[in-house]
Image: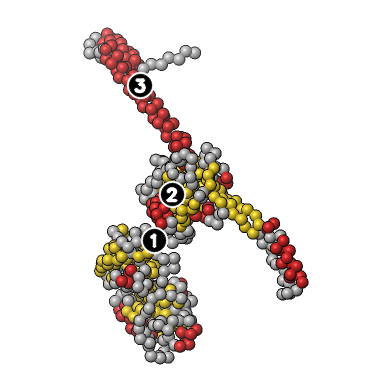
Amino acid sequence: MTRRFYSQSGSSGVRIARQAEIARAEAKRTGKVKVATPLPHSSTLLRDGLILLGISLLLLTLMFVSRAEARDNSSLADLAEKLQDSVVNISTSQKVTSPFPGGQMPQLPKGSPGERRFKEFLERNKKNRTKKVSSLGSGFVIDAGGLIVTNNHVIKGADEIFVNFVDGTKLKVEKVLGVDAKSDIALLKVTPTKPLKAVSFGSSDKSRVGDWVMAIGNPFGLGGTVTIGIVSAKNRDINAGPYDEFIQTDAAINRGNSGGPLFNMSGEVIGVNTAIISPTGGSIGIGFSVPSDTVVNIVEQLKKYGKTRRGWLGVLIQRVTPDIAEGFGLTKPKGALVARVTKGGPAEKAGMVPSDIIVEFDGSKVKTSRQLPKIVALTPVDKEVDVVVLRDGEEKTLKIKVALLQVNPVTDVNLEGNEPADDPEEMKISGLTLGVISPEFRQKYRLSPKMKGVAILAVDPKSAAAKKGVRAGHVIVDVMQETVSVPDDVKEKVEQLKKSNKKNIIFFISRGNGEFGFVALPTTEDNKG
């Protein structure tokens, strides 16, 4: 059966002609003349047809162009091909001595013939118990002359380190220029026979959640593996170190990817793949990369000094919780609360005191306590910076000269004060049983002779204080920034705060072993004197 297709303009013409014919028949029957509807002119039909044809051709063109663009954007082959030569496999080996095959050395009488013979046996078999252990990781070239970045844990303890390139070239690492265990970054040096293809760093700060990323590495020894995903989150703290601000990605990262680069779609390194969360050991879409903004600073220091030179402020800080914020008169939590100032440190020299809240450091806003350690660490040593603190509800600017962070900086603080007179009175306040620091209390909890304040003899296990980690043996040093020496001092201050409708009381507490901190306790809790 033949099918016929009509244009909309053609069918309209047929309808109009039919209507005219009906009108003429009606006029003939009734004798009345009606004005006939004129037929469309042929030139008008032609014009309409050409317009429709032009629109159709335009739509078809746009469709083919968009499909071509979609085909180009759907493949990352060109980007992967451009970057693969710069990503390397790291193989290491080290000699380890295995323990006695039985697991535990037999318990033999000291000086007995059996003990002597057993030791001789171990000496004879010592060589047999020494073996080589190999491990694999990833890295990437940052300088054509042979500088390579990887993770510290990839090369830690290695006797030999080799770098394997995509083209089959294998180079032995001549020198480990430096490592930084806290950020898990290492810088290696090889001598190539020809210039290497290096990649450049991009800004991790400019990357956004949802941006596409590409990981290239050596998972499970399968070199040159490319995976893609997105930036799942930023500034992740996974308790791997004091400066955690990882980029989280769902690009597949597995064992062997450690030390490899995380690229943005411009081919820039925005992270160094370091860790995964996985109950199975394989990728479940939760991987973490050290941000490039951190890596660049560390690499420059490793190149220049062979180690990192981090800034040091000389304070112990803690988080400003909502109840602590209310206790200090803030509308919302912000900044880093100074719990302790190191004697002789930069902060003390500049006049910083416990209970100061640091809200700005060298022009950078400090929104949370987590931010401050990293900001200070990345500040050049000996640089003088402006530090804005909140003190008694007002902003105060201190000029501080940043010092060099030592491996084990001195953190002792000398609390001055007078030894309180013996007072046998005990008192219950906010779930705490308080008393004076007696010689027995000082001896039992091994307190420093210089420790002053009010002793916490017991803590109600159902109280807010217990839930916040306050324990018997702790010492209240001050309440709302006023020093206390006997339980009555604490009671008096608490009663004043209750009358002023304060919801929380800020206690500055020594937890022993040099640990201090602010604790906010509610004024509404029953107090019994």
| Tag 1 secondary structure | loop
From the viewer's side, name the closer residue of 331 and 80: 80
**Residue 459: horizontal and vertical position, in percent?**
46, 79
**Residue 477: horizontal and vertical position, in percent?**
38, 79
Q: How many marks?
A: 3
| Tag 3 secondary structure | helix
Distance from Cα at disc 1 to Cα at disc 3: 65 Å
Outermost residue toward the right in this view: 113
- Which residue corresponds to mark 3? 57
Q: Is residue 324 visible from the viewing direction of this image?
A: no
From the viewer's side, name the closer residue of 26 and 137: 137
| Tag 2 secondary structure | strand
From the viewer's side, name the closer residue of 366 and 92: 92
- Which residue corresponds to mark 2? 271
Residue at the spot 38% in from the left edge and 90% down from the top edge:
421
**Residue 232: horizontal and vertical position, in percent?**
44, 49
Amino acid found under the numbered disc labelled 3: Leu
Labels 2 and 3: the sequence-earlier one: 3
Amino acid found under the numbered disc labelled 2: Gly
Residue at the spot 31% in from the left edge and 58% down from the top edge:
364
Residue at the spot 29% in from the left edge and 76% down from the top edge:
500
Q: Is residue 142 visible from the viewing direction of this image?
A: yes
**Residue 355: horizontal and vertical position, in percent?**
33, 72
Up the image or down, 342 lies above or below 54; here it is: below
Amino acid found under the numbered disc labelled 1: Arg
Q: In the figure, is residue 444 to the left or right of 118?
A: left
From the viewer's side, name the closer residue of 45 and 96: 96
Tell me the mark number nearer the camera, choosing from 1 and 3: 1
Q: Residues within 10 Å of mark 2 (few under 14, many from 20)?
A: many
